[in-house]
Amino acid sequence: MRKITKIVFILSLLSTLLCDLSFSQDIKNELAGYEAKIEQHKQENNPSLELEYLNKAAFLCWDNQMYDKAISYFKRVLELNKKLGNQNGVLLSINYLGVIYDETQDYDTAVDYFKKALNIYRNSNDKKNISSSLLNISQIYQQLTNYDESNKAALEGVEVAKEINDLKLVRSFYGILANNYQSLGNSEKSIQYFDLFASIDKFLKKEEIKTIKEESETQVQKAQQEKQQTQQELAKQTDKLKQTETSLAKVEEITKEQQMQLELKESKIREQAAQLKFERLVRNILTWGIIAILVFLVALAALYRKIRSQKIQIEEQRDILDLQNKKINSSIQYAQNIQRAILPVKNQIENLFESFIIYKPKDIVSGDFYWFAQVKNTAFLAAVDCTGHGVPGAFMSMIGNSLLNEIVLEKNIIEPAKILSLLNEKIIESLRQDETENNDGMDVCFISIDIKTKKITFSGAKRPLFIFNKKTSEFNEIKGDRLSIGGAKRKNKDEEFNNHIIDTEVGDILFLSSDGLTDQNNSERKRFGSNRLREIILNNISESMERQKEMIESELSNFQKDEEQRDDITLIGIKIN
């Protein structure tokens, strides 16, 4: 028996070693195949297929814990996605790298990648992924014992998770905050956040218990059915037992001589059976050992095929999402072309005035727009800030531009206050704000300029006009009315706008703007502000208008740095000739 046991053990060990070597060689062969495909498609200048095989190689290395190679491949994937402008692919690559560095406990590098992903999600306002990224960052800072940064990410994550009503994420953030404050020795805040964590956890577990209870009731019903089947089987076994007892009673009637003969025969049979049993045991051990090895190999191959199939499905779904993302971006880019086409041509303004225009949409399309027209000896100029930004704001800007053309150029209304009043009525009418919950609108700085007399007529809807008087070197602000364009639910719906008439001279400079520039914040959450803008303008007022524009943009860039632009920005400056 000992020899047989040793033989079985050696066979099992050899089989395991052969499987490991075979599996390792398969991985190397598959990876070499991917490398050949990558190089082939690179030479053919086919970046899509090159990207496909780079991803396959990266996942193969990751699945088999070849982390350094996986990182190398994913970095190549990231660079190629950037080159192709594939934003979704860039995001996936960055997140994969963050997860691998987290798994290999390189937390500093991991948090850098998760922060890159967070900035991209913020640009697209993807709140679900913003909160997930903040959770990753908070957990990694906790691993690094940087509890202040961990708390900062967790607190921001709580607010975003609340907005999307994701209680599981809120619970996770409260748990992190409770642990962090406990590590910092702040028991009061630790208890406060633990209580919040516990209350949400209790609610979620209550929901889970409710689900488990429903499943348990189903299992009880199933158990009752099985019990009935068992009782039926027990009844059948009882009948068989009665039949056996009857047979035993008959056996007892056999004579003693017959019993002795039977015992002798049974003894010989048992001896033969023991010999056969021993031989059968040896055969069974060898047979089942081989079968077990074969079953293990078959199961391993099936598992490998299943994993590869799932990976292919994931890649196909990813490609579909990439295509959808490209189509959406293409549509928005086309919308940007349409929106820019309706903006005034720069030469129209420059033919009458020395000027500059700073126009920076937050997204591809903008909720800000500027409008210019000339009717005989009167020029009209407006800076308009619509509700929202991106696609919703762009729709409002298209409506506003169309209505201004209709009011001034078709109906020949030239008084700014009347123009804003009529614009207000038409916005309410166009959006049916008296009948619906729609409350969108726009803030406007609107001026008309008599080209001969230099007289300015200004009317504002929550936006001021800034004027630099060359003669007195004063920089003045003329406030607009505290009324907005559009929104039927306000009390001042029927109030009229006012005109402000200003006499200007050659060299005076007018500034019209939305609130995007002054409301822009830096990394310390401080606003750019009207005072800072006034100071920059006064320091460069003697420069050309183009130079003034460059200085304002430079100061804004230095102030903002890497902070995300929070709103559309429009600033127009014109010098009276």
Image (cartoon, rainbow, N blue to C red):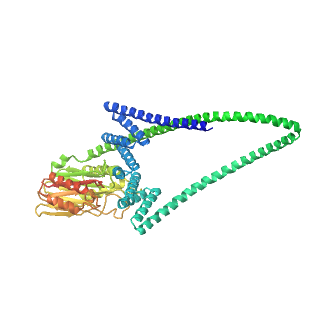
Determine which quarter of the picture holds residue 324.
Answer: top left
Location of residue 559 by image quarter: bottom left
Left or right of 512? Residue 234 is right
Q: Nearer the viewer, residue 542 or 102?
A: 102
Residue 23 lies, in percent from the top left, at: 47, 36
Instruction: Give the percent coordinates (x, y) of residue 114.
Output: 36, 51
Q: Is residue 469 left or right of residue 290?
A: left
577 vs 240, left or right, is: left
Count of numbered labels shown in the rendering: 0
**Quadrant in the picture for the C terminus:** bottom left
**Is any part of residue 239 visible from this angle?**
yes
Q: Looking at the picture, how far across and down is residue 32, in whole percent?
A: 39, 33
Q: Residue 203: give x, y in percent of width and height.
A: 52, 61
Q: In this view, does 447 lie to the left or right of 131?
A: left
Going by the picture, which residue comes out furthest to the front?
2
Compared with residue 389, is residue 258 higher up or lower down, i.e. above or below? Answer: above
Q: Name above or below for residue 242 compared with residue 562.
A: above
Q: Quadrant where the N terminus lies?
A: top right
Name the one closer to the observer, 237 or 544.
237
**Nearest to the observer: residue 129 or residue 66:** 66
Residue 254 vs residue 241, the one in the foreground: 254
Q: Residue at x 72, y 48 (%)?
A: 228
